[in-house]
Image (spheres, helix red, strand yellow):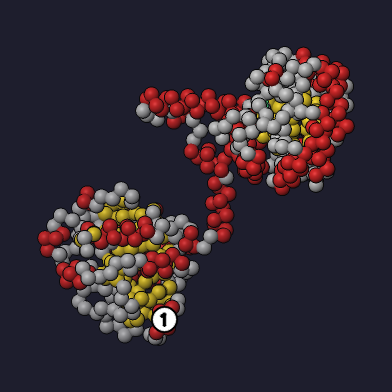
Amino acid sequence: MKKTKMLREIIKPFETNFILEAHNALSAKIVEEAGFKGIWASGLTISASLGLRDNNEASWTQVLDVLEFMSDATSIPILIDGDTGYGNFNNVRRLVNKLEQRDIAGLCIEDKLFPKTNSFINSENQPLADINEFCGKIKAAKDSQKDGDFIVVARLEAFIAGWGLSEALRRAEAYMDAGADAILVHSKKSDPSEIEAFTNEWNKRLPVVIVPTKYYSTPTDKFKELNISLIIWANQVLRSSISAMKNTSRLIYEEQSLINVEDKITSVSEVFRLQGASELEEAEKKYLPSTGKKVNAVILSAAKGDKFGELTDDIPKTLLKVGGKSILAQQIDNFNSLGVKDITVVRGYAKEKIKFTNVSFTDNDDYANTTEVYSLYKAIESIKTNTIISYGDIIYKKYLINDLLTDPNNIVIIADAECIKDDNYHEYITTDTEYSKKIFWQHVQVKELTSDKNNPDISGEFIGLFKVNETGAGILKDALRDMSAGKDFRKLHMKDIFNYILKKQHVTVRFIKGSWLDVNSMGDLQKSESYIYD
Ligand code: SPV
Ligand code: MG
């Protein structure tokens, strides 16, 4: 149902309804969630929340901006307190136009002069508008609305300004004839006597709206008896928030601590809920490319590295410095700079030396008798929906991570087409695809991984960097769990895991040419000094 129609439903004769004040999108949403069928966009509270007085200090377009947020955040109708209409009939016409564009359901204008003052400040001195001039405004508003259900409420300030009942009735009658949809009778008395006097004479000719701020103790049944159509509770949400904000601010200031505050205030997760954070998460799953998806990294850094002499007496090789920065710090920085913040480092040798505040740790305390597979198994819970797994002793260019992030395949490994075939342990891949330039931008399926450098089918060297997506993560975890039961598990290498996977699933390779370094020896370390890392 249209918001204008909804407002019409709650401003009708013979039935009393209620709306509550809001002054921004958040409070409007809270009012809706409380169950109200409509919102009063109060001039007093909107200006107060902007740090201004209720004297038209906020321009009408500034009020309009606030209304737009309120309207976007809610699905119930908003009746705007339009003060005196921010000018003459011409300003009111434009106002109605702009309100309708923002799906505001109704406008209330009061018969005072611009710039107005709040009805409870010095009210006896407040001049009223000329009746005819105000009737012209009402007519102009009604004539300019495009939606027939848009509501114009004419507000009587006669009682507020110290005029009596007959002036109020005279005006109400004129405003009705000018086309108003309802009459708001305002009173500053602490009892409803003026309202009662008015409604007795008025005799339900148009719906009557009231704002019982000053006569708040009057039972609501009394208003029902008086056939009030709409009761506006005009400022209580702002006032309650002021009390809460004062208490919290004072407490935090005095105690210089949050300890006595935290459980008295709304949780951060409730703030997220009110903002609709979950909807965005769902939308991200639907619309974002894989680069925007949750990505995490696991860095396998348990090994001591035994070819570095005393350099690794106290630290694992992942902490060896290259160009002033440890290999591990270099990797973490690269991941961070690409937006990957969820990083798990598997520590082993000299684990206490690995100190980073922005990563989480998993330990492989049996690092001396195990290999990288066992370290990865220790971090199995960190293999999630998009996980990059990296050996902790390799240096590579950042673009490789980017390439992996955008790759749609389930399991993608990086291999260097120019492989080293020395006596150190290396893992090579074989493929069915003939080696050619083309392979650098094709997705090639891996046939097998091998550590046999004499295998004639070798087309590249696995560099110790790969990615799994959600499906790939499931496949990898199943393989690790299946193989963990075998008695040789602690001695297995990544090639064994991949070969196990390859019996049933595809593993894709992306070839590179250089752009990385496996730090295996002092020689490598020296070479790496001249290496470009990003
Ligand atoms: C408002 O809420 O701004 C009103 C009601 O206009 S009152 O403050 O009572 O004038
Ligand atoms: Mg007001």
Picture quarter with the C terminus = bottom left
> In the rendering, at what x and y percent does residue 382 appear?
39, 54
Q: Amino acid at mark 1?
A: Ile
Q: Is residue 514 above or below residue 406?
A: below
Quarter location, residue 257 = top left
The number of callouts visible is: 1
In which quadrant of this rendering is ligand 1 seen? top right
Q: Is residue 38 left or right of residue 229?
A: left
Q: Give the residue at x 67% y 29%.
A: 116
Q: Is residue 66 above or below residue 420?
A: above
Asked if disc 1 is less than 8 Å from ligand 1, the answer is: no
Which sits in the foreground, 56 or 218?
56
The residue indicated by pointer 1 is 439
Q: Give the residue at x 41% y 81%.
A: 439
Q: Is residue 102 above or below residue 133?
A: below
Q: Give the residue at x 33% y 63%.
A: 390
- Whether residue 500 is visible, yes or no, is no
- Whether residue 294 is visible, yes or no, is yes
Q: Is residue 350 left or right of residue 211?
A: left
Q: Give the residue at x 29% y 79%.
A: 419
> In the rendering, at what x and y percent does residue 334 appear?
34, 61
